[in-house]
Amino acid sequence: MSPFLLTRTLPEDATGAALRGDVLHGLTRTPKSLPPKWFYDARGSELFEEITRLPEYYPTRAEREILADRAPEIAAATGAKTLVELGSGSSEKTRYLLDSLPDLQSYVPVDVSESALTGAAEALLAERPSLNVHALIADFTRGLALPGTPGPRLVAFLGGTIGNLLPGEREVFLRSVRTLLDPGDFLLLGTDLVKDEAVLVRAYDDAAGVTAEFNKNVLAVVARELGADVDPGDFDHVALWDRDNEWIEMRLRARSALTVKIPELNLVVPFEAGEELRTEVSAKFRQDGVRTELVAAGMELTHWWTDKEGRFALSLATAS
């Protein structure tokens, strides 16, 4: 069996330090906010997997449809010998690419979760014993150095996760991805597309309340990790469409005036009745906008694929 290498580029306490910094910054600013990455402890990851199976939540199905239909075209266009996946998680959708790249030698999954990387690698190597897997425990939003692997390389950022970054953050991120690309390398980018407002809102406010529980899970994480005396039941889930910015916002709205104490940070956070805490932005895109952002980062859009209903897109770009 080919080797499985695991490299840590994050310090051991990097996650805890990042959580403390994000909570301190986000809960002392106006309006209050927390980054969506803190949804994803073990329970949050389970809830998100449940969300992807809900009838209202189309992005995962739509992206999987594109990958199933277009993976051979992606393989032909890139000739990739190395696949790098940012935010790889379980690597489930990646299998469409792995199965379609005839010259693939190496897979480099990148994630902050060691357990997710190890579990995915074990499953992949059981199916593909000749594949070289070099996993990176890293935060790809803070710059990334890739291991030496054969080119051409295909860097994949799937799931529409780029929409969780604000415009300035996307600019920084895409420029950092550009630095990873040598001539002949490609970026495969998943983006959710602008569509009917009702469809978008339902995707983030399902009838079964799973997304509401997922949203409130960020409070459970803060309570467990930082000792906060916060009750998720004191907040309501809110999902709304911002027409001007063309993004969905998820928020938590305080049902009454309350105070949250966070001993780990020596912090007391007052909430007024009805005050909202923003927990996620999920931007939706148009082809021209994606092309413009790629060009600004030094990349050229070469291919654009959507699902049959035009809900989601995969784009392929190379260094310009």
Image (cartoon, grey):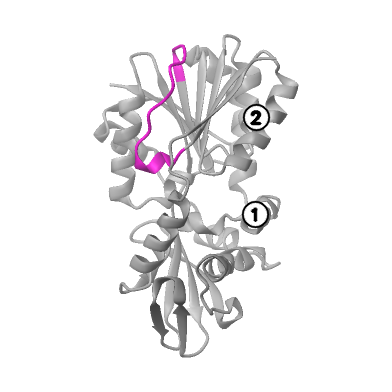
> Which residue corresponds to mark 1?
42
Find residue 118 and report its horizontal and vertical position in percent: 64, 35
> Which residue corresponds to mark 2?
121
Q: Quadrant of the C terminus?
A: top left
Residue furthest to the top in view is 103
Which region shows up in magenta? 138-153
Examine the structure image and report whether residue 133 is included in the region drawn in magenta: no
The amino acid type of the residue labelled 2 equals Ala
The amino acid type of the residue labelled 1 equals Ala
Q: Is residue 292 above or below residue 21?
A: above
Of 268 and 31, the residue lying toward us: 268
Find residue 283 and report its horizontal and vertical position in percent: 42, 52
Who's the residue at 58% across and 38% down the image? 63
The answer for how far apart the CA atoms under marks 1 and 2 are is: 18 Å
Q: Can residue 284 be spotted in the picture?
A: no
Q: Is residue 35 above or below residue 173?
A: below
Secondary structure of residue under mark 2: helix
Binning the other alpha carbons within 10 Å of mark 1 as few (below 14), some (14 to 19) or many (20 upward) gives few
Q: Is residue 49 above or below residue 5?
A: below
**Mark 1 vs mark 2: which is more N-terminal?**
1
What is the number of the mark on residue 276? none
Who's the residue at 58% across and 36% down the image? 307
Of 302 and 97, the residue lying toward us: 97
Q: Is residue 26 left or right of residue 208?
A: left
Who's the residue at 62% across and 21% down the image? 98
Binning the other alpha carbons within 10 Å of mark 2 as few (below 14), some (14 to 19) or many (20 upward) gives many
For residue 211, what is the image quadrant? bottom right
Secondary structure of residue under mark 1: helix
Find residue 4 and report its horizontal and vertical position in percent: 61, 23
